[in-house]
Image (cartoon, helix red, strand yellow):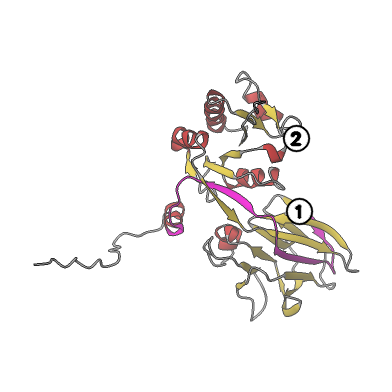
Amino acid sequence: MTGTTERPREILVVAHARRDDTVAAARRVIAALQSAGVRPVLPAGDDELREELAGVGDLAELGTDVAVDALELAIVLGGDGTILRAAELVRGGTTPVLGINMGHVGFLAEIEADDIDDAMRRVIDRDYDVEERMTLAVEVMDATGARIYETWALNEATVEKASRERMMEVVIEIDSRPLSSFGCDGVVISTPTGSTAYNFSAGGPVIWPTVEAIAVVPLSAHALFAKPLVVGPEATVAIEVLKRTDGIGILWCDGRRSHDLPPGARVAARRSTEPVRLARLHPAPFTDRLVRKFQLPVAGWRGPDVPTPEVEG
């Protein structure tokens, strides 16, 4: 009988190369992987990080040496921006992302930097859960209805005015029906994951990750009816930039991908068929994550009353 060769384990390491603490943490992660016989992989074209990690041994390159589909996991050292970058790198595959917070709030991160060693032991043992997060499929049509741009978002898609001194004129549409038109600075279309990001800063609601929904939040709207909305996960939200708008607008997705919006453009966002997968080591309640990340005051909380068990006899 011919024996089979076990497929080598390959894990992507994404880190911010311009921070000494992040580079040092990346060295610890890579050393732990190599000691366990796991091949570390770096993003393609990340020459600055590769240079900072010189001397740590063989580091494969994503796309050249290792395909996205071959990755077991992506370990991200940084804040939410770096995690969003990693989600972009593994888009199209099924690779989960494990965030190690090296930033400030780091809401998408699973653990803090102090827990790296324990996290690596669990990664090597494959001792983690995978949680799927809803994403948005976003498309832009021009004034003739022709599709001119397609992208996606994990946090939010934002239609914004491109010039500070000008205002946008938009119509909000839900499921092919117009809802309201007004002048504004823009509109945020958010997933539950993004509800604690730009959506939250703009006055939108925090949505628990277990709730599948889409939030729509106008920015500085000149209108009586311009409150945040929450619609179902299967809804299609469209923002039309009216032709009377003075100047162009801009679409931003996750603060990473953008496209100019001329007057008459239409941006449509709906649930994507490709979720982002997050690796979870500690399945703590989302309420606890909110309290910890935002440092919310909970002093004086007594908790639910627990009845005293009856004693027989």
Percent x, y of residue 152:
72, 55
**Location of residue 50 by image quarter:** top right
Percent x, y of residue 124:
52, 33
Instruction: Say whether residue 166 is left or right of residue 216.
Output: right
**Location of residue 300 by image quarter:** bottom left
Range covered by the magenta-colored residues: 258-287
**SS type, badge 2:** loop
Residue type beneath disc 1: Ser
Check disc 1 and report the residue beneath it. 258
For the point 59% across and 64% down, which residue is it? 202
Placement of 205 over or under 258, stated as above or below: below
Q: In which quarter of the image is the C terminus?
A: bottom left
Instruction: Say whether residue 72 is left or right of residue 262.
Output: left
For the point 66% across and 58% down, which residue is it? 135
Check disc 2 and report the residue beneath it. 63
- View extreme (left): residue: 313
